[in-house]
Image (cartoon, rainbow, N blue to C red):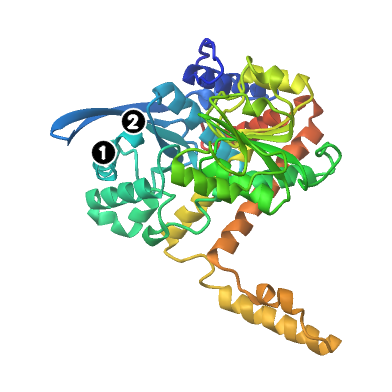
Amino acid sequence: MNAIPQRDVHPGQTSSAGFLDSVDQNFRHAMTFLDLPEGLSDRIMQCNSTYTVRFGVRLRGRMFSFIGWRSVHSEHCEPVKGGIRYASNADAEEVEALAALMTLKCSLVDVPFGGSKGALKIDPREWTPQELERITRRFTQELNKRGLIGPGVNVPAPDIGTGEREMAWMMDEFRRANPTDVINARGCVTGKPLSKGGIAGRTEATGRGVQFAIQSYLRDPRTAGLNGKRDLKGAAVIVQGFGNVGYHAAKFVSEEDGARVTIVAERDGYVTNADGIAVEALKQHQIKTGSILGFEGATSFPGDMSGIEQPCDVLIPAAMENAIHAGNAVRIKAHLVVEAANGPVTFDADKVLRTRGVTILPDLYVNAGGVVVSYFEWVKNLTHIPFGLMERRRRERRNQTIATTLERMTGKEFPADIRDEFLEGGAEIDLVRSGLEDVMRSTWIRIADLIEQQPELSDYRTAAYVASIRQIADAYEAIGI
């Protein structure tokens, strides 16, 4: 991956070249702390392949042409994994940068995937559901012909502009095209509806992972915490982007951790309430009206892009890449920036923020919840056994025995307010959340331990990159490359 000259990025704009350049610079910076065999660093950095597919679909009485991409960054571990986004501003450079991040992300959280990413240059809002289905199925056909989808080779997932519906269409089209592999066909994509082989907790996974990442940072006595505090209770939080990730992250930190979500920013402006925004009510307003603006429980600022620049304890950029760049980094007033989106802070902005004493939890770690739970779903699809099926009732009986024994020993009844929860054997959603929390906690320890061992790394992004690249290098050397 050769360095690409940085383009100017102005407020409200994104630049895929700037995004790719930031990923490239983070790679190169991390490499200075690693002693790799000659040539291996370039092999790890380079994107293996990027496929461009062009196809036509007859709609509305005429032929429409579409262009899409699927990039495979690294096959040091297979299958490769990565989402597919539908966006009118998508391009090959953006897809390559996202694929590189997927390679690093999978390595960092230790799930057995290489990195991939895909995109279709389309605005899904311009097409009816029936038209989108035909377009998606044709796209899937093109990917299948080139070996770019399949449970053992390349496993897509939802991203911006796609969701459970699109994944179900892709899975069904793959199954039709591969009738001899029907038994494993469900594993060709993740993020599917439950009725089509999905897994409980996948929709909330990335937002839930954001919550676990913040908790892991705050609970670690080696970190600075948040103004001396080790929890989010009462903390002012700004969330940029109110799609799936931003909504769930805001919901969990406010309803479960006691934070005040004081600002939610979107592409058409922001809403604010110093006492805290009712996140679920705001989401219902957005679903009903198509915008967060006009919400009765907050003050609206239409067309104002300065929402992320207001004072807060925690800023969660959960929208597009390059949201914080050299032009606005000096105006960010957060103590902690938590990267829920991919690449929301450019390489140059990262340096500005850290110079000003802002702590950044990197995207490589923070938004890994989606791929972790996607891994759980993939395993479920290939084993054909629902999570908990083999052990839930045994666990319930064991807990019942413990409760009964405690009652006999103490002569008191088990507390009624916690009895049901204690006796519950664990539904799939509970097991998924438990597994995700374990991965996010252990990954944080890996990052923090590395900084403790190598203080010269100095920041969490560099430590995450170094830990990830080191593991990829070990994988390449193990197979003789």
Q: Secondary structure at mark 2?
A: loop
- Disc number for residue 122: 2
Most distant residue in the left direction: 61
- Disc number for residue 135: 1
* Near-viewer residue (377 or 261): 261
Q: Is residue 137 left or right of residue 267?
A: left
Residue at image location 70% in from the left, 28% down from the top: 310
Q: Secondary structure at mark 1?
A: helix
Q: Of the residues shown, which amino acid type is indicated by label 1? A: Ile
Quarter of the image where one finds residue 364:
top right
Residue 343 % position (x, y):
57, 28
Residue at image location 13% in from the left, 34% down from the top: 61
Quarter of the image where one finds residue 50:
top left
* Near-viewer residue (46 or 198): 198
Q: CA distance from mark 1 to mark 2?
A: 10 Å
Q: Is residue 147 left or right of residue 433?
A: left
Residue 188 % position (x, y):
37, 49
Residue 387 % position (x, y):
51, 65
- Disc number for residue 17: none
Task: Mark 1: give few (<14), some (14-19) or many (20+) Cα within 10 Å.
Answer: many
Asked whether residue 329 is in view, the answer is: yes
Q: Of the residues shown, which amino acid type is indicated by label 2? A: Ile
Task: Mark 2: give few (<14), some (14-19) or many (20+) Cα within 10 Å.
Answer: many
Residue 210 % position (x, y):
63, 43
Are circles 1 and 2 on residues that touch, CB within 8 Å? yes
Q: Earlier in the sequence, mark 1 or mark 2?
A: 2
Q: Is residue 397 left or right of residue 380?
A: right
Asked whether residue 371 is in view, the answer is: no
